Amino acid sequence: MKTASPFTPIAALSGGNQQKVIVARELDQNPRLLLAAQPTRGVDVGAIAFIHQRLIEARDASKAVLLISADLEEILSISDRIAVF
């Protein structure tokens, strides 16, 4: 993500870049439980891979990750367990 300045307001970013900022902010908090609802909606392919990798790293670090997604391919590719409601 490139902006004119590090002081660019988040509201001035595209929707996909806003999504990346939110994901980065939440992962930076080092949560014990991460609720990821549609974490890759609206972001580019490179960002999707980055987000998936970070979710897997959180899982590998013994964090609980709850992924909520309408993208079946996403669910099947990174989930250990699947529940359908």
Image (cartoon, rainbow, N blue to C red):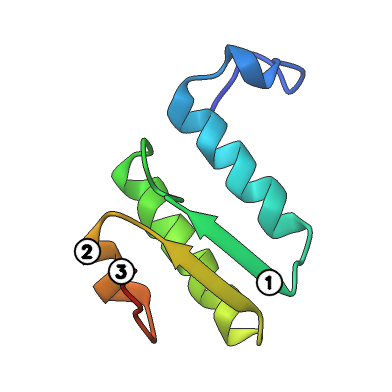
What residue type is disc 1 on?
Leu
What residue type is disc 2 on?
Leu
What residue type is disc 3 on?
Ile
Residue 15 position, x and y percent, is 46, 25
The quarter in which the C terminus is drawn is: bottom left
- Foreground: 25 or 85? 85
Q: Quadrant of residue 60?
A: bottom right
Element class at badge 2: helix
Q: Measure the C-alpha gap from mark 1 to mark 3.
A: 18 Å
Looking at the image, residue 49 sits to the left or right of residue 26; the answer is: left
Image vertical order of residue 54 relative to residue 28, above or below: below
Q: Measure the C-alpha gap from mark 2 to mark 3.
A: 5 Å
The residue where tag 1 is placed is: 33
- Foreground: 48 or 37? 37
Q: Answer whether labels 2 and 3 touch (C-beta < 8 Å).
A: yes
Regarding residue 12, the answer to whether it shows in the image is yes
The residue where tag 2 is placed is: 72
Pointer 1 or 2: first along the chain: 1
Residue 44 position, x and y percent, is 33, 39
